[in-house]
Image (cartoon, rainbow, N blue to C red):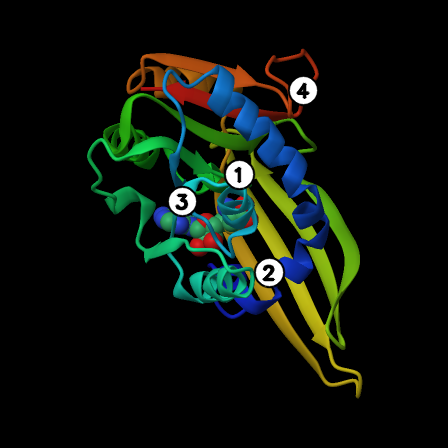
Amino acid sequence: MHELYTVLAEYYDAIYRKRAERVKKEIDFVEEIFKKDAKRSVKKVLDLACGTGIPTLELAERGYEIVGLDLHEEMLEVAKEKAQQRGLNIRFLQEDALEINFENEFDAVTMFFSSIMYFDEENLQGLFNGVANALRPGGVFVADFPCWFYGGSDGPIVWDEQNGNERLVITDWREVEPAFQKLHFKRLVQIIKPNGDTKAFFVNDELNIYTPREMRLLAREHFSEVRIYGNLKRELAPNDRSYWLVAIR
Ligand code: SAH
């Protein structure tokens, strides 16, 4: 569990290079949600499960006052170093998102890159509760999650990336348990140095699959308004395969 966020933290941005390139578009969309869905002006944002800060730093660069929170110190170290290099003043906290204890502090709370899938039904209730308390009235919670039907179990996908002079060869596959709505995300990361020395790491994370309807029903218990949007547009289309939960306190 969690090798991706500990021993592999320094490789995270190389592994997700393509996603980092897309982040500006994602944050454009999130800013549109801040402006059109939140019922207050958004200035102060809490980014839960901020990881190496790919979205966190982008929000900070756009002038939001931002707190980044993550369970893993190794991820936060990478985020802190990047923030320093870019001259950004961000407060980072090492904490479990389930343990947060903020009261009326933020205009928006975000949780990006399917991180919400780490929480099972019971934990999700606790998460929503903590998020609703952290928000000021009219504030908005934004979290993305993928479609449950997006392939089910599948065989290995292999791709490669470069990290400095090291080559990464990454092999991903998933095993889905439909009855339990669990997705076992498996990944083998091989790191090859120019002289051929190779290290390998195995990632095996258990994620929770939610349908848009389930997410809506669970969130409704904690927020006054709940919307599910499709990918990067403020509406849901029949064949959308990734979703954005938008919940207003
Ligand atoms: N949001 C970031 C990182 C996503 S990776 C991005 O968009 O790039 C998922 C992150 O969730 C990891 O950094 C991991 O440490 C964090 N995480 C997992 N469980 C968590 C929990 N219970 N509380 C806080 N962070 C958690």
Does the Cβ of the disc 1 residue fall within 8 Å of ligand 1? Answer: yes
Q: Which residue in the protein does label 1 denote?
A: 114
Describe the element under mark 3 as helix, strand or loop.
strand
Q: Nearer the viewer, mark 1 or mark 3?
A: 3
The secondary structure type at the circle numbered 4 is loop
Q: Which mark is residue 12?
A: 2
Q: Position of residue 107 (x, y in %)?
A: 35, 29
Asked if the residues shown at circle 1 and circle 3 are in contact, with their CB atoms under 8 angstroms apart, the answer is: no
Residue of label 4 = 240
State the CA–CA distance, disc 3 to disc 4: 30 Å
Q: How far apart are labels 2 and 3 at the CA level?
A: 21 Å
**Residue 229 placement: quadrant:** top right
Answer whether labels 1 and 4 touch (C-beta < 8 Å). Answer: no
Circle nearer the viewer, 3 or 4 = 3
**Which amino acid does the dot numbered 3 rest on?**
Ile
Q: Residue 169 placed where, x, y %?
A: 75, 65
